[in-house]
Amino acid sequence: MLDEIEIECPYCGATFTALVEPDDADSDYIQDCEVCCNPIHFHVRDDGGGGLAVEVARDDDS
């Protein structure tokens, strides 16, 4: 089952829903913004309470 995470693009500021697999905990990957198509670096971690914590950054800041 996929988790829906609302994120804000670090490039254009648009807010959109990203789908994250629970198995992605403790991973990093790149996904393009749905609005401006710039590459967003996703940093996915277990939040310690059974959910996911997702941090996003510009790919060139990583």
Image (tube, rainbow, N blue to C red):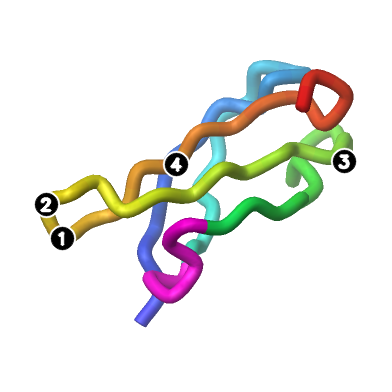
The amino acid beneath tag 1 is Gly
Identify residue for label 1: 50
Residue range of the region highlighted in magenta in the rendering: 21-26
Percent x, y of residue 54 = 44, 41
The amino acid beneath tag 2 is Gly
The amino acid beneath tag 3 is Cys
Among the two numbered marks 4 and 2 on one chain, the one whose residue lies closer to the N terminus: 2
Q: Which mark is residue 37?
A: 3
Q: In whole angstroms, how far apart are the C-alphas of marks 3 and 2? A: 32 Å
Among the two numbered marks 3 and 2 on one chain, the one whose residue lies closer to the N terminus: 3
Percent x, y of residue 38 = 87, 35
Among the two numbered marks 3 and 1 on one chain, the one whose residue lies closer to the N terminus: 3
Q: In whole angstroms, how far apart are the C-alphas of marks 4 and 3? A: 19 Å
Tell me the element at label 3: loop
Q: In whole angstroms, how far apart are the C-alphas of marks 1 and 4? A: 13 Å
Among the two numbered marks 4 and 3 on one chain, the one whose residue lies closer to the N terminus: 3
- Residue found at x 35% / y 43%: 53
19 w.r.t. 38: above or below: below
Q: Are marks 2 and 1 in contact (CB under 8 Å)?
A: yes
- Residue found at x 80% / y 47%: 32
The reply to whether the magenta stretch includes residue 39 is no
Identify residue for label 4: 54
* Front disc: 4 or 3: 4
Tell me the element at label 4: strand
